[in-house]
Amino acid sequence: MIPYIANTFPPQCSTCNVTLSVKHMLLHCVRYHEERRPLAAYCQSHRLPLTHTTLLGDEHPDVVDRLMIYLTETSLIREL
């Protein structure tokens, strides 16, 4: 279980106090702001929007490498 999830339904991010979702963890959670910077910079330099569609879609396989780094650095890889 992700340690920062409060025992609520639907699950809440205890950092941001919003409904927990993959989109929130990838794009919005302030807990991972610094770790997200390289991913955002990569997308910006390649003129790609930083969206869950870009990160999880199959149109930009090069982004998957950056996403895996982000997931590893945040330890989210173990939670998915």
Image: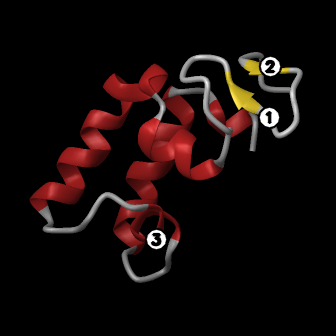
Q: Position of residue 79 (x, y in %)?
A: 75, 36
Q: Residues within 10 Å of mark 1 (few under 14, many from 20)?
A: some
| Residue nearest the observer in this picture, 20 or 59 | 20
Q: Position of residue 78 (x, y in %)?
A: 73, 34
In the image, residue 1 above or below residue 48: above
Question: Looking at the image, is mark 2 or mark 1 earlier in the sequence?
Answer: 2
In the image, residue 32 above or below residue 37: above
| Residue nearest the observer in this picture, 40 or 72 | 40
Judging by the rendered image, the residue that carries numbered circle 3 is 53
Say what secondary structure mark 2 lies in.
strand
Q: Residue at x 67, y 39 (%)?
A: 19
Amino acid type of the residue that numbered disc 2 sits on in the rendered structure = Ala
In the image, residue 56 above or below residue 33: below
Judging by the rendered image, the residue that carries numbered circle 2 is 6
Mark 2 vs mark 3, CA separation in Å? 27 Å
Q: Position of residue 24 (x, y in %)?
A: 54, 43
Quarter assignment of residue 61:
bottom left
In the image, residue 57 above or below residue 42: below
Q: Residue at x 77, y 16 (%)?
A: 3
| Residue nearest the observer in this picture, 2 or 5 | 5
Amino acid type of the residue that numbered disc 1 sits on in the rendered structure = Pro
Question: Looking at the image, is mark 1 or mark 3 earlier in the sequence?
Answer: 1
Task: Give the numbered dot on residue 11.
Answer: 1
